[in-house]
Amino acid sequence: MEKTTNKPTFIPKMYCNLFGHDYQVSKKVTYHVKEYTCRHCKKELTTNSNGNLIELTPKFREINAILSRIHASRMQRLKKKPAVSSIY
């Protein structure tokens, strides 16, 4: 039986403990909701309804997937709608 070590993940976590996380946008759900991933330790965060960063749980993954689908369909519908002007 082989013994596995967590040394590759220990160094990035130690780096984040010393210097803080380096978050990058990994997915844009809507204009205001985004998902973030730390470059070093791969910790995932998202924005909640108040705009604060929270950990990305399976519940929030599902919420973001639904939001993304609704946002995409709304953008498609707005592109098809002709621009009407009331300047006549």
Image: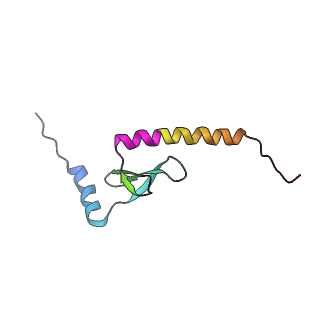
Q: Nearer the viewer, residue 74 or 25?
A: 74
User: Is 58 in the magenta?
Assistant: yes
Image quadrant containing the N terminus: top left
For image coordinates 34% across by 60% down, the residue present is 21
> Horizontal and vertical percent for residue 9?
25, 50
Q: Above or below — where is 76 with respect to 40?
A: above
Q: Nearer the viewer, residue 14 or 3?
A: 14
Q: Above or below — where is 44 with respect to 2?
A: below
Provide the residue span drawn in magenta: 56-65
Colour pattern of the rendering: rainbow
Magenta residues, dominant SS class = helix
Q: Above or below — where is 59 with respect to 40?
A: above
Q: Nearer the viewer, residue 78 or 3?
A: 78
User: Is 53 in the magenta?
Assistant: no
For image coordinates 66% across by 38% down, the residue present is 77
> Horizontal and vertical percent for residue 16?
29, 60
For image coordinates 39% across by 44% down, the residue present is 60
Name of the residue lying farthest toward the top? 1
Q: In the drawing, does residue 8 fall left or right of residue 43?
A: left
For image coordinates 55% across by 52% down, the residue present is 31
> Horizontal and vertical percent for residue 58?
35, 40
Name of the residue lying farthest toward the left? 1
Name of the residue lying farthest toward the right? 88
Q: In the drawing, does residue 74 fall left or right of residue 49?
A: right
> Horizontal and vertical percent for residue 54?
36, 53
